[in-house]
Image (cartoon, rainbow, N blue to C red):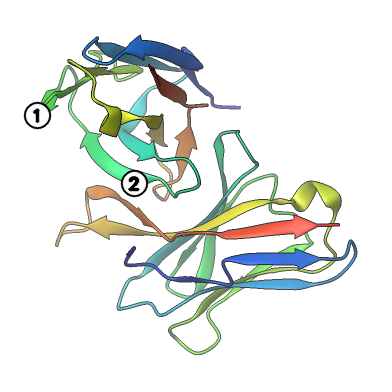
Amino acid sequence: GQQVMQIPQYQHVQEGEDFTTYCNSSTTLSNIQWYKQRPGGHPVFLIQLVKSGEVKKQKRLTFQFGEAKKNSSLHITATQTTDVGTYFCAGELMDSNYQLIWGAGTKLIIKP
Amino acid sequence: EPEVTQTPSHQVTQMGQEVILRCVPISNHLYFYWYRQILGQKVEFLVSFYNNEISEKSEIFDDQFSVERPDGSNFTLKIRSTKLEDSAMYFCARAEFTYAGTENYGYTFGSGTRLTVV
């Protein structure tokens, strides 16, 4: 079946360092969405990317969608403690009723 | 506070018992979803519900599961005979769409119900 692979599973960074997570789909996606989940919380929508090669920015967060609409990345510049959580990508399948296939998530951990 | 409200926040049930998870109240949205997340793992799609009918369902959503919108607002997920492996966070979600309905702008998740089967 369709899968979305996300790496790394964990990333430990010092506060102020950058963070990147990558997603790769086995099939072409209609769009890809990114969510953040704090420990014990629910996924919170960050952004949706629809167009091939699209790049979007939200302050220190940069989201990219690959040309083939199969891969995506999230890059956080100069991490802060408020960035802690798990970041999930979720791809929407073509010809589906907006069903999302989720990556396994990347947990951002700030080293003390 | 999330715009999608779920109750209860935590439910403990005996294996083999029936549970009903609720998503309340819901405004005039047409698309609803149930997802689950086993502790520390990825979010998994269960079922989508459009215009009071099941639109799509995953392999997880077997005969033990059912969804209803009994009174036009509440949206329920029923598990008829719970198993230990049903222990998870269950999230209700709605999708936000453009006026034309051709592109969605992400999902709003409820705060979830933590189901523990013992």
Q: Quadrant of residue B66?
A: bottom right
Q: Position of residue B13 (x, y in %)?
A: 80, 66
Amino acid of disc 1: Lys
Most foreground residue, B21 or A81: A81
Q: Left or right: where does residue B1 sit relative to residue A10?
A: left
In the rendered image of this protein, does residue B97 appear above or below residue A84?
A: below
Is residue A79 in view?
yes
Residue at 23% from the left image edge and 25% from the top image edge: A80
Residue tagged 2: A44
Amino acid at circle 2: Val
The residue to which callout 1 is attached is: A59
Write down the quadrant of residue B29 in the picture: bottom left
Q: How many marks?
A: 2
Q: CA distance from mark 1 to mark 2?
A: 17 Å
The answer to which of B52 and B4 lies nearer the viewer is B4
Instruction: Residue at 32%, 34% (x, y): give it.
Output: A34
- Local secondary structure at mark 2: strand
The picture places residue A15, in percent across and down from the top left corner, at: 27, 16
Q: On the same chain: label 1 and label 2?
A: yes
Q: Nearer the viewer, residue A27 or B61?
A: B61
Would you say residue A88 is visible in this rendering? Answer: no
- The crowding category of the residue bearing disc 1, from other C-alpha atoms within 10 Å (few below 14, some 14 to 19, many at least 20), is few
Subunit ID for the residue under disc 1: A
**N-term mark: 1 or 2:** 2
Taking depth in this image into account, of A73 and B100 the one nearest to the observer is: A73
